[in-house]
Amino acid sequence: MGRTEGEHALKDPKNITRSRLLIAEDDPMLRQIMGIILRRDNYDIDFAENGQVAVEMWEKGGYDLILMDVQMPWLNGLNATAAIREKEHSHGGHTPIIAMTAHSLQEDRQRCLAAGMDACLSKPLDLKESRQVIQEMLYQAKVEEEIG
């Protein structure tokens, strides 16, 4: 079965790369590096230095995807994700959240998914894998939005 013109348009990365991402990461060096790389990939980037700030920024709206560090001060990534998912449950919508964790054991990944995260990336981040997961999550969200 062939793809429709709309499906081809959605699959074309140029049609979904101008997305707004929130990076919740307490390490300023990693924030800077990620910002440089993802801006080169044509994403609009905002930063939160902890989970509490991430939730507050998300509440203001407009993010297509969140990259959430699991271990942060004030409010960790698991609790920040749970807070966002609770608010989405009340108000509708779903923002893809990708965990970034230095703990790559299967049980750590399961905790991230149980908290409501959609995918996990292990630190140190692999650039190719990170780009691929971000693109897949954005594509999936766009398809779900189109389907309704």
Image (tube, grey):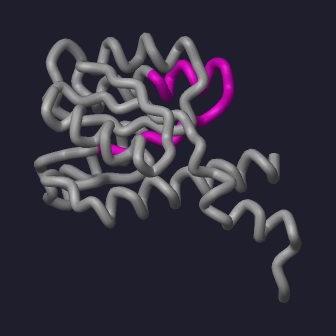
Magenta stretch, residue numbers: 84-99
Q: Residue at x 68, y 66 (%)?
A: 11
Locate residue 95 relative to residue 48 in the image: left or right: right
Find residue 69 and report its horizontal and vertical position in percent: 24, 36
Quadrant of the image occupied by residue 117: top left
Q: Is residue 22 above or below residue 52?
A: below
x, y percent for residue 114: 36, 44
Residue that sits furthest to the front in the current view: 40
Q: Is residue 55 above or below residue 101?
A: above
Would you say residue 89 sits in the magenta stretch?
A: yes
User: Is residue 75 rendered to the left or right of residue 8?
Assistant: left
Quadrant of the drawing holding the N terminus: bottom right
At which x and y percent is residue 61?
Answer: 58, 19
Residue at the (65%, 31%) spot, across then down: 93
Q: Residue at x 47, y 35 (%)?
A: 21
State the count of labels.
Answer: 0
Residue 89, given in percent of the width and then of the height, sits at: 60, 26
Residue drawn at point x = 29 percent, y = 32 percent: 78
Foreground residue among 43 and 71:
43
- The answer to whether residue 91 is above or below residue 142 is above
Residue 47 lies in the magenta stretch: no
Out of 107 and 80, give the one closest to the viewer. Answer: 80
